[in-house]
Amino acid sequence: MKKFEGFKPETIDFMWELRMNNSKEWMDANRERYKEVLKEPFDAFAAELAELSPMFCGEKSKYSVSRINRDIRYTKDKSPYRPNRWVVLYDEKFRGTEWKLHPSFYFELDPEGYTHGLGMWCATPSFLTAYRKKIESNPAAFQRLAKKIDKDPLFRLEGEEYKKIKNENLDPLSQLWYKKKDVLMVAGGELEDIIFSPDLPQFLAEEWSRLKGMYAFLSDIEAE
């Protein structure tokens, strides 16, 4: 695999053109270009991130890169391809798509810019119950973790939340985390110079290391 040299302006051009010409005919005519300017650079980028994963995961992680094809079986939008691309990095003990039920780091690139961070998107009710119990078991320790992220100038807390779940014994900041259905710590920006730099994996690894404490907290949860 080639070394990651930074994404190219041609990568972004391809994404824009795919968004405007989202059809099998267009993709068939541009498949080699897709491999050259998007697939191969992104695969190299993901592999380098995984090599750096001890910085933010504490140990070597696995990674999964999104496919270009969309699953259109259950959606009104029948566009066959994704005009963006993402990678997730997760504990190597997980198999297949099991990572979706657990915290993982991610990076997503689209024609307008990028987002990245740490999150849980498909946590089960049993996992979320265990998550809330873990917060309740040591409120002071969790408050310190939450304050660190709340004061961070880069990451912000996002995600859907339950309307009726609450614990009035917790401080207001911890309450925000307690009622989350999707726990997401998100950052991002427009198409800055770092996107086109070979230093992008190192940049992300250093940014994600600021979330290492919360990643350890979430990774330690054992659902029944």
Image (cartoon, grey):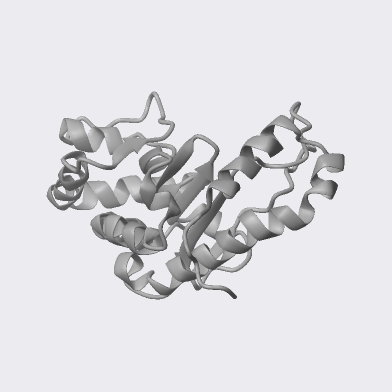
In the rendered view, tell whether residue 150 sits above or below residue 135: above
Picture mark count: 0
Q: Residue at x 43, y 74 (%)?
A: 51
Q: Residue at x 70, y 53 (%)?
A: 34
Residue positioned most to the right: 25
Q: Is residue 60 visible?
A: yes
- The quadrant the N terminus occupies is bottom right
In the rendered view, tell whether residue 116 sits above or below residue 159: below
Residue 84: horizontal and vertical position, in percent? 60, 43
Q: Residue at x 57, y 73 (%)?
A: 2
Q: Which quadrant of the figure has residue 74? A: top right
Residue 176: horizontal and vertical position, in percent? 28, 33
> Which residue is nearer to you in this view: 79 or 97?
79
Residue 220: horizontal and vertical position, in percent? 34, 63
Q: Residue at x 34, y 34 (%)?
A: 179
Taking 6 as reference, is 189 left or right? left
Taking 217 as reference, is 96 left or right? right
Residue 99: horizontal and vertical position, in percent? 53, 59
Q: Is residue 123 visible?
A: no
